[in-house]
Amino acid sequence: MSERKETILKQAAAYVCPNRVAMLGGLGIDLVLGRREGYRIWDIDGKELLDFHLNGGVYSLGHRHAELVAALRGALDTLDIGNHHFPSVQRSALGEALAGFTPGDLQYSVFASGGGEAVDIAIKSARHATGRRTIVSIHKGYHGHTGLALPAGDERFLKLFHSEPAPGDFVQVPFNDLDAMEAALAQHEAAAVLLETLPATYGFPLPDPGYLTGVRELCTRYGAMYIADEVQTGLGRTGARWGVDTYGVQPDILVTGKGLSGGLYPIAAAVLSPKAGAWLHEDGWGHVSTFGGAELGCVVASKVLEMLGRDEVAQHAQRVADTLGAGLDSLQQQYGDWLVEVRRCGLVIGLKFNDDFGGMLMSRALYDHGLWAMFAGLDTSVLQFKPGILLSYEDCALALERMEAAIRQCVSQRA
Ligand SMILES: Cc1ncc(COP(=O)(O)O)c(C=O)c1O
């Protein structure tokens, strides 16, 4: 390790994130990000890695995509973040584009600076629209660390800050269990069900056939809103524009973030149906966010939507998904004792290994072989494997080679 890197790691431990430095260092992962371009990242000491983590889809179109960088550079000539109190050319244009890009009657965009804040907006909107408080979500869900998103997710992060919610405000049921969902909705007058379409931090378990449409029906029957958290599953990653499109669900509220930023300027949004957005007619300052919907971010996000709307981009994403899917299936046939499950829906992929810490072991082994993919935080037996939408076929082949090398390493270490 270079002296420079050692100094930075010490500085990070002293001033920013001591536990992360210790924890990742303990796993043998000592990445300090330097150069980044397309689907490659380089450690400041020069180690090159294929990026199959993409910060959850932030870099779905690649790091520093030339068109996105040009859009941001152009915007910097005349714009800044704008003033969040006034209507804005860029915010209005993005709002209209999102209404066109999202399913059904979703209409109003309320902008945030991150996914958690956008989930908070979604929950507040559902509570206003229904006059109810309870939010039903699933065990091992993850929606961010802000005030309302936090208690909707796994309890791990609540306990640390003694932030347990009032009894009945947040109710959790097992994923893929429609009976439990119905029992919760029958017992509590719920404002909303909040669901990641494929729960990312839980390791992307696939919804059973009929599960999500079943939840939609239950929401309608019991008067609750359906909030789709599409922060990781939206923007072309499942093969459709949104994960809910793939599963045939029409939500009342859709939350987007991560990739909307193009990896260049933070932005997220809750997109609301007219009913969910009723509060916007009542109090124009009902939600205020100085940086939410910053004009520079709106310019980049509009370009992201325009790129994702191109036929050739969608077709390429499909081919990447097919190529990697076929490769992973064949690896599973070969190494089925270790790679026990390939969960995939387009480019949303979770790989389950035959060890409680299998995803972690694979993260480390792949790191050694030049690919960065991260284990699922709430199920460490699973590796999240997140390929970019514009990945080249050469890089698909390279990624599969590195995956096989990492699998072999883990298998031989276990023997
Ligand atoms: C599904 C999901 N929802 C919400 C969030 C929160 O987004 P942010 O970190 O931008 O607040 C995340 C972040 O990883 C996420 O994966």
Image: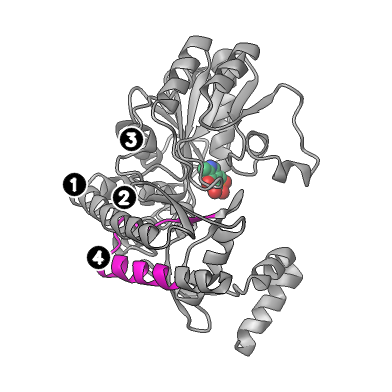
At numbered mark 1, what does the secondary structure look like: helix, strand or loop?
Answer: helix
Q: Earlier in the sequence, mark 3 or mark 1?
A: 3
Q: Earlier in the sequence, mark 3 or mark 2?
A: 3
Is residue 172 visible to the viewer in this orientation of the structure? Answer: yes
Most foreground residue, 272 or 103: 103
What segment is highlighted magenta in the picture? 382-405
Q: For the point 53% across and 11% down, which residue is it?
A: 222
> At which x and y percent is residue 77?
37, 60
Q: Which residue is mark 2?
A: 303
C-alpha span from label 4 to label 1 = 18 Å
272 versus 98 height, above or below: above
Image quadrant containing the N terminus = bottom right
C-alpha span from label 2 to label 4 = 24 Å
C-alpha span from label 1 to label 2 = 15 Å
Q: Residue furthest left?
A: 312
Binning the other alpha carbons within 10 Å of mark 2 as few (below 14), some (14 to 19) or many (20 upward) gives: many
> Horizontal placement of 410 versus 21: left or right?
left
Q: Which residue is mark 3?
A: 246
Are the residues tagged 1 and 2 within 8 Å (C-beta)? Answer: no
Say whether residue 77 is magenta: no
Kindly report which numbered mark, 3 or 1, lies closer to the viewer in this rendering: 3
Q: Which residue is mark 1?
A: 311
Are the residues tagged 4 and 1 within 8 Å (C-beta)? Answer: no
- Residue type at mark 2 is Lys
At numbered mark 3, what does the secondary structure look like: helix, strand or loop?
Answer: helix
